[in-house]
Amino acid sequence: MTQHSLILHFQSASRTTEQPTRSQFLRWAKKALVNSCEITLRLVDRREGTELNTLYRHKNYATNVLTFELGHSHDGKIIGDIVICCPVVKDEAKKQKKKLHNHYAHLLVHGVLHLQGYDHQNNKQAKEMEMLETKILHSLHIPDPYQTEYE
């Protein structure tokens, strides 16, 4: 099995409490690697989340996670940014009755997979991506994040 490398730059610009630590995010991101990556992870509040979602997706609201693939480094690493909007994550976790850190883990794994080319534009892609996310989260002892939607 090939060992992929990860460089994780961590920025916290959110005042929301109960955020995971950089080391927790690093552990979760490593589990989702299928390529070597250099990622800047930025935690934001609703205002910045809304600005970014409006600017890049033309949707005027804060979403839970945004992923930006920026290209490749000279040594072939995928370079990209992942932005997680902390207040949205906190609200979703509460509404969906999920443990907060489990929801952060799921969204980071989701973002890291997007960065590496996975998508959910159609049912086949969505099913494949959800199965991979569930497998990765299971390896972290985190329950299937999609199961609660069907309860």
Image (cartoon, rainbow, N blue to C red):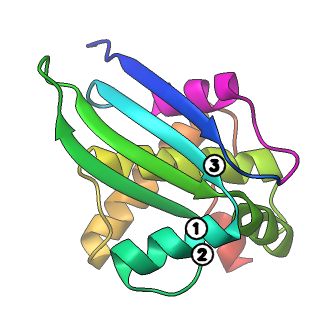
| Residue 38 makes an appearance in the image | yes
How far is mark 2 from mark 3, CA to CA? Answer: 12 Å
Q: Quadrant of residue 25?
A: top right
Q: Residue at 52% across / 73% down in the picture? A: 51
Q: Earlier in the sequence, mark 1 or mark 2?
A: 1
How far is mark 1 from mark 2, CA to CA? Answer: 5 Å
Q: Is residue 113 above or below residue 77?
A: below
The residue identified by callout 2 is: 62
Residue 68: horizontal and vertical position, in percent?
33, 54
The stretch in magenta equals 16-32
Q: Quadrant of residue 35?
A: top left
Residue 18: horizontal and vertical position, in percent?
87, 45
Q: Is residue 118 above or below residue 81?
A: below
| Residue 63 makes an appearance in the image | no
Mark 3 element type: strand
Residue 58: horizontal and vertical position, in percent?
38, 85
| Label 3 crowd bin: few (<14), some (14–19), many (20+), radius 10 Å | many
The residue identified by callout 3 is: 43
Q: Earlier in the sequence, mark 2 or mark 3?
A: 3
At label 3, the amino acid type is Leu
Whether the magenta-drawn stretch holds residue 62 is answered as no
Residue 142: horizontal and vertical position, in percent?
69, 42
